[in-house]
Image: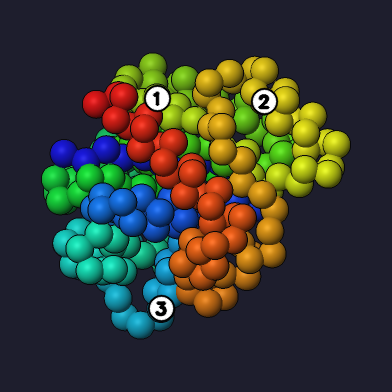
Amino acid sequence: MGRTIAVVNQKGGVGKTTTAINLAAAISASEQKVLLVDFDPQGNASTGFGVDKEDGLATIYNFLAGSSTMQECVQTITPTWLSIIPASSDLAGAEVELVNEKEREFFLKRALATIQEDYDLIILDCPPSLGLLTLNCLVAADSIVVPLQCEFLAMEGLSQLLKTVDIVKKKLNPELTIEGVVLTMFSQGEGQNNQVAMEVRSHMGEGVFKTVIPRRFEVSESPSYGKPVVWYDPWSQASWAYFNLAHELLIRKKKDS
């Protein structure tokens, strides 16, 4: 049965979705069967792979509404190795609809159980919040990857997220672990970036990935072409960083298995 990793940070604009789609693409290139689940109502992961959310495709919300099975929601991105379950803005109403459901925190976990055996790895792109949708991701996941922008305010958000993870571990998902923190949008020449990186590594130790994702124009440009940067500009500095991050993640996964 495949492992499930949630890419999570309640702060927007930190490279969360960019990390999710590029990890999915890079890991699938190593012939791992990967499913990316877009669980963010903004649907940016779907857009990042060129999925037209207005094309009548079944989304994760359709499963929630009972109009589609999980298998019907899966869209093939590359033959054999990479698929996605897209999201649409309809998912924003899911939190309200789930509130009165019994064991509402386990909706996504139960949904993934119907397809989990088909994949080596499932990656969840979480919403930029700590609401019920993100809670569902934390309950469904085996571990989390936390993209962290190299700025001081991001440190406060990390502390809050780690407290939430501890609560989820104690009450809902005792198996949840932190796969690692990945430093994103890093500019070598900016002193604050270096200082924040040093503080995070001092605090988290080996819990921080060695790979650092640089701030590069091709990263922000690639979604407009419906491609992750590792496809859009595979020889770029940012692409190599994401391939290295995928390699690190696979090594950690192998050690844990």
Q: Can you say whether 100 is above or below 160 in the image? A: below
Of the numbered discs 3 and 2, the one sitting upstream in the chain is: 3
Residue 197 seen in render? yes
In front: mark 1 or mark 2?
2
Of residues 35 and 58, which is closer to you in this image?
35
Residue 83 image-quadrant placement: bottom left
Q: Which residue is mark 3?
A: 52
Q: Amino acid at mark 3?
A: Asp
**Considering the image in quadrants, where does the C terminus appear?**
top left
Report the Cα–Cα distance between label 1 and label 3: 34 Å
Picture coordinates of residue 42, whole percent (x, y): 51, 63
Image position of 233 (left or right of 115): right
Residue drawn 45% across the image and 57% down it: 21
Q: Which mark is residue 177?
A: 1
Q: Amino acid at mark 1?
A: Thr
**How packed is label 3: few (under 14 Cα within 10 Å), some, or many (20 or more)?**
some
For discs 3 and 2, the disc positioned in front in the rendered view? 2
For this rendering, which residue is in front, 169 or 64? 169
Label 1, residues with CA under 10 Å away: few <14, some 14-19, many ≥20: some
Residue 200 is marked as 2
Q: Position of residue 184 (x, y in %)?
A: 64, 44
Q: Residue furthest bottom?
A: 55
- What's the residue at 39%, 64% (across, down)? 87
Query: Where in the figure is residue 12, as x and y percent of width and height?
Result: 63, 50
Query: What residue is drawn where x is 59% and y is 55%?
Result: 238
The label on residue 136 is none
